[in-house]
Image (spheres, grey):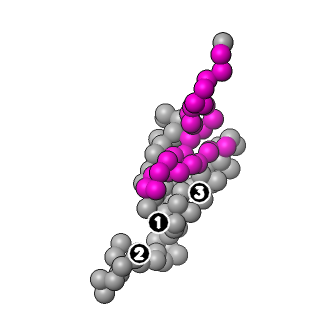
Amino acid sequence: MQRPEGGPGPTPLTEEEERRARAVLFSDLGNTIAERGWVRFPAYSPEERRRLVDVAHRLSAHWGQQVFIEAEDQCAMKLYLAGHGPQPTNPPLP
């Protein structure tokens, strides 16, 4: 979101907007993770990344199992359950 005066940078959310944004992410991302074990979501700013880390921690507490989170690149984060994360570059031999 751009500042009303057109300057660069995001406009901070009010406490209520932040609470609602995190609640929507908790629900939407949680549903996707529950269905397929992982979700990729854009995060362009440090605030967006902190929000996703908080959502991962809240989902972990809610489900009683860890929801892992990692940066995939400068623009996206991945939240996932065990077994749905990064694959080892050299898988173990059978």
Residue at disc 3, secondary structure:
helix
Residue 39 appears anywhere in the view: yes
Q: Which residue is mark 3?
A: 53
Rendered view: 7 above or below 74: below
Instruction: Say which residue appears at 48% left-offset and 43% top-offset.
Output: 39
Q: Which residue is mark 1?
A: 45
Residue 85 lies, in percent from the top left, at: 57, 37
Residue at disc 2, secondary structure:
loop
The span picked out in magenta is 66-93
Side (left or right) of 59 relative to 5: right
Instruction: Say which residue appears at 51% left-offset and 67% top-offset.
Output: 47
Instruction: Say which residue appears at 46% left-offset and 75% top-offset.
Output: 13
- CB contact under 8 Å: marks 2 and 3: no
Judging depth in this view, the residue of 53 and 45 nearest the camera is: 45
Give the residue type at disc 1. Answer: Ser
Rendered view: 79 above or below 50: above
Give the residue type at disc 3. Answer: Val
Q: Mark 3 or 1, which is nearer the eye? A: 1
Instruction: Say which residue appears at 31% left-offset and 87% top-offset.
Output: 5
Q: CA–CA distance between discs 3 and 1?
A: 13 Å
Q: Can residue 70 be found in the magenta stretch? A: yes
Q: CA–CA distance between discs 2 and 1?
A: 9 Å
Residue at disc 1, secondary structure:
loop
- CB contact under 8 Å: marks 2 and 1: yes
Residue 27 appears anywhere in the view: no
Judging depth in this view, the residue of 51 and 93 nearest the camera is: 93
Side (left or right) of 56 relative to 73: right
Side (left or right) of 14 relative to 94: left
Side (left or right) of 57 relative to 22: right
Give the residue type at disc 2. Answer: Pro
Q: CA–CA distance between discs 2 and 3?
A: 19 Å
Q: Which residue is mark 2?
A: 10
